[in-house]
Image: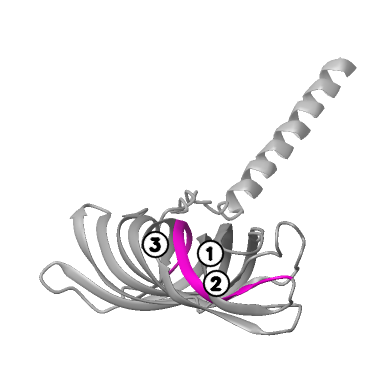
Amino acid sequence: MMSSLKRNLFLSVFGAAMSATVALAADLPAPPVIEYEPETPVEIGSSWYLRGDLGFAVYQGGHASWTDPTNTNLIGFHHENIANGWVAGIGAGYYFNKHFRADVILDYRHKVKYDSTSTCTPVSPPAGCTPGDSYEKLNFSAWTLMANGYVDLGTYYSINPYVGGGVGVAWLKASNHKTVGTGSPFKNKTRTNFAWNLTTGATFDLAENVKLDANYRFVSLGKARTGGRRDNSSTEPVRFENLYAHDFRVGLRYDLN
């Protein structure tokens, strides 16, 4: 009898407690609804482009000279000629808006021939120069790395003209010097220079995201030097003043968007 009474009392208390819990739960506010928002994918290729160029380069400048270390006479060169050559480049760029873009281009300039005559031939003894001509020739080659900016001027009959310019560095090499005259040839040397360019050109859409780019670029490559003589008879180099290139280039641009 006592056991039944205890059991009934427990069931009554438990039932009352459950009823109170259910009533309290019914009075609580509904839990907030958390909406899942998928992540927006990042467009890695948006506004970027790749480019490749091939071109024909016409060179100017040089104005070579050599200082004879024996008597410090400045020996000038004359009848100077620099052959034409080719240039190839690759790069990557970014469109900031429909009118302005920028890129970085690495160019290689294949070696070209240089030849000239000097106004006198060093002789020893006696020290100094005697009248006469010495035929000189060597090769120039270069790498350039430049950061460039361009202004796109709009589209006219599917053609987009632009102007631009850039600055960077040139590694200008003088090599394979040979002389027909008195004196040992000079050693090879690479000189690092500040370089700059001015550009004008136009693009034409070939296909979706692909543009044909034809341009003219005036490039200042800086000064060049040979090393001293190969027989070490003189450490004085042949010095070349600023070298310039007129580049006529055609390339492709591929938009990554």
> Which is more N-terminal, label 2 or label 1?
1
Q: Is residue 250 left or right of residue 118?
A: left
Q: Is residue 200 left or right of residue 48?
A: left
Kindly report the secondary structure that dominates the magenta region of the rendered protein.
Answer: strand
Q: Which mark is residue 145?
A: 1
* Mark 1 and mark 2: Cα distance apart in space: 6 Å
Residues rendered magenta in the picture: 102-124
Q: Please name the residue that numbered disc 2 is placed on.
A: 168
Considering only vertical position in the picture, is 98 above or below 189?
below
Mark 1 closeness class: few <14, some 14–19, many ≥20 residues within 10 Å? many
- Disc marking residue 47: 3
- Residue type highlighted by circle 3: Ser
What residue is rendered at 36% in x and 63% in y?
A: 84
**Secondary element type, mark 1:** strand
Residue type for callout 2: Gly
Asked whether the viewer can see residue 138, the reply is yes
Whichever of labels 3 and 2 marks the residue nearer the N terminus, that label is 3
Q: Secondary structure at mark 2?
A: strand
